[in-house]
Every structure is written in C-alpha cells, then in structure tokens.
Amino acid sequence: MTKIIDKKIQSIIQQCESLSIDDIEKLSNYKKLKTISSIKSRRCCDIYLILAIIFGLLSLFTTGISHTGIEHFLEYSYRKLFSIDIYREECLAPKLESIIDIFRPPISCDICHNLNHIERISNITREEFEEKYAYTNRPVIITDAMNNWLATEEFNFKFFKRLYRMNSSALLAVEENCQFFPYRNKDEFETLGDVFDMDLERAYMINDNYRPWYVGWSNCDYSTAYLLRQYYTKPYFLPKQSESSKLDWIFMGTPGFGAHMHIDNVDLPSWQAQVRGRKQWTLRPVPECFFQCKELKFIVEPGEIIVLNTNVWYHKTFVISEDEISITIGSEFD
Ligand SMILES: *[C@@H]1O[C@H](CO)[C@@H](O)[C@H](O)[C@H]1NC(C)=O
Ligand SMILES: *[C@@H]1O[C@H](CO)[C@@H](O)[C@H](O)[C@H]1NC(C)=O
Ligand SMILES: O=C(O)CCC(=O)C(=O)O
Ligand SMILES: [Fe+2]
C-alpha cells in the first residue's frame, strides 16, 4: 500500500519538475511532497503514513465518514493532514476542495464584525485597495475594472469549446494537470472534454426544459494562460508587486446551479470577474463567528469583480441570470 503512494508522490514530483517552472521551490504542495518523500527515502520510519492512519481513524470516529477501501481512506487522511490531494495530482493547482479544515487557525471575527452588506467601490487607487481590502479579508466588489476587456465580448461557450477542442494541447493539459469541478454534474462530466461535448442547445438553454449544468476548472497550461491573457488584464487595483502568474480559474454554467457551500484551502485571497451573466453569492462567517457576524447575500453583476478570501469565508454561488450562462474568470493574488 505504501508503495503505491510512494509511486504516486514520485510521479507528481516528476510531473511538476517536467513543467520547468522557475519558482517551483515556492509551490507549497511541491515542497510538502518533497518533504514527505525525503523522509520516506531516509527510511527513518514511515511517520507520515502512521500519522495519516492515526489521524484518519480519529476523523473516522469523529465524523462518521465512511470510506471505501484503504486507498480512499489514505487519500482522505493525507488530504486532511497535509492539505495534499495526492490523487488529484495537483502540485500546481490550489485546492478548491470543500473540506472543513480542522487545522485551520482560528479566524478573528474582526473580519466580519459589523459587516452587514458588501461594499461596491470604483476608481480606487492601488494604495487604498491594499490598505482597506487586499489583505484584510473584507470582501468587496469593484465595479469599474473590466472596462477594456476583450473577454466581455469574446468569452462564451463556443469560445471555450474551440479553445478546448478535442485533442488540443489546452484540453490535454487541463485534463492531465489541472483541476476540474463538475459540481452537481459529476455523473455526466468526468472531464472538461465532456462539458464541451454537450450539444449547443443545452449549452445555450435553447429549450426551456434544458438540463442545468455548472462547472469550474483551473487552467495550469502556460500557453493557454498566455492566450487567455489577451482577453483580460490583471485588475488595475491589485497591488503592483502582486503576481500575475497565478492560475486562472474559470467557472461557467446555467441559471439554477452553482457551487455548494464550502471553504477553501488555497493560501491566498482571490478575485473573480463576472464576465457574463449574474451570480448570487452567499458568504457565511466561520462557525466561531456565527454569533458575532452575519451571513451576506448579494449579486455580482456582469462587469463587476468580487475580491474574496475564500479561505476564511464559507461561500456558495447560484447563477440567476435569465437568459445567459454565467462565465467568470479569476485568480488568486498575493
Ligand atoms: C478617480 O480618482 C482620482 C483620485 O483618486 C480623481 O482625481 C479622479 O477624478 C477620479 N475619477 C473619476 C472618474 O471619478
Ligand atoms: C483525437 O485523438 C484520438 C486518439 O489519438 C483519435 O482517435 C481521434 O480521431 C482524434 N480526434 C480528433 C477530432 O482529432
Ligand atoms: O464561482 C463559483 O461558483 C465558485 C467560486 C469558488 O468557489 C472560489 O473561487 O473559491
Ligand atoms: Fe471556493
């Protein structure tokens, strides 16, 4: 059993290295995997595995989650214990997995105390944004940051269907290395390719009785990222030193569906641009602040960018545009 996991870890490390990224040492998942594998190779003891098993058993008893087979069980333990999803091969991808991270450090309720609604701002300087919002965990909507984006005209289902056409390097890269979230459509969409196989009538909601769908994926392929960046620019209000080489995340789908309530474990706050359609967000404070803070519910309109630290706010989305699918693009920032 441990051999299978060793092999898996080695193969992820190799995959990461073969991508020849300059700052590979800075990738936290890569670092974690290297540490795990170097401890394993010293044969001092399989401490990680033992920890994972003990921890997994404990969580089994405390959460009552049932596991099918030891592999699944270990995967679960590694994920909980090290925040590493070895079966998703996501060295480069942040995790949007819906886990309640029990190792999450307590969050100060200052971030949501007295917060009754989300602020909408425009024409903000980088300095003011940095001081008031960038790292304060206060969610905010910026209404004037997509004015000259080609994306607002060009992004639609057909655009992505062409970009991710069968056997394209973009699609292969996503299918092999990036993350894909089929949400409630997981029984029908195994990969991103399956999404673009759906007939256009359904994609464009031609019939009133279309079956709803909603998906999200990260783009971790460099040439695809380069192409996508011809259609949008890094939002003007982000701190200057903030990296723009972070992964793009795209979420797309019809009214009636969205992402379930979850909290992420991706290190950094993110921005998300509502390119098309309207989406309702529900933000819920972490449990320790339930009595001090309120749930926030609001709509992000096309042309607006929401900035949110998804690691400290539970969040849920729901597409509500009437005749259009919702398309968003976003990224983490530091
Ligand atoms: C934007 O803000 C700057 C100063 O912060 C101001 O000079 C400028 O007139 C504002 N522009 C608009 C369109 O409000
Ligand atoms: C994609 O690749 C597969 C396997 O190499 C091949 O059978 C198929 O015809 C290709 N499809 C297209 C549309 O190029
Ligand atoms: O846009 C969505 O539907 C979900 C986004 C999300 O979960 C995230 O950005 O962390
Ligand atoms: Fe999320």
Image (tube, rainbow, N blue to C red):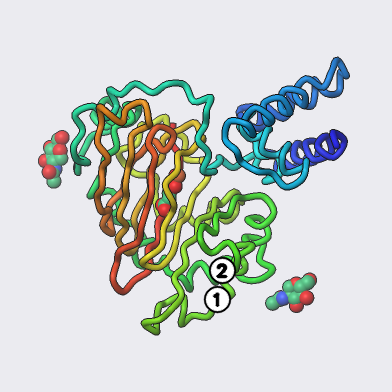
Q: Which residue is labeled 1 in the image?
A: 198
Quadrant housing residue 46: top right
Residues 305 and 308: in front is 308
Disc 1 is placed on an element classified as loop
- Residue at x 67%, y 33% (from the top left corner): 77
Q: Quadrant of ligand 1?
A: top left
Q: Position of residue 256 (x, y in %)?
A: 37, 65
Question: Which disc number belongs to residue 256?
Answer: none
Vertical side of 55 occupied by 295: above or below: below
- For the residues labelled 1 and 2, say whether their Cβ atoms are less than 8 Å apart: yes
Left or right, residue 79 beside residue 74: left
Kind of residue at disc 1: Met
The residue positioned 27% from the left and 32% from the top of the image is: 129
Helix, strand or loop at mark 2: helix
- Relative to residue 44, is residue 107 depicted above or below? below
Q: Nearer the viewer, residue 316 or 229?
A: 316
Residue on which the image places disc 2: 195
Q: In the rendered image of this protein, does residue 91 appear above or below residue 191?
A: above
Would you call the spot at circle 2 few (<14 residues within 10 Å), some (14-19), or many (20 or more)?
many
The quarter of the picture where the N terminus appears is top right
Kind of residue sitting beneath label 2: Val
Other-residue count near label 1 (Cα within 10 Å), few / some / many at <14 / 14–19 / ≥20: few
CA gap, disc 1 to disc 2?
6 Å
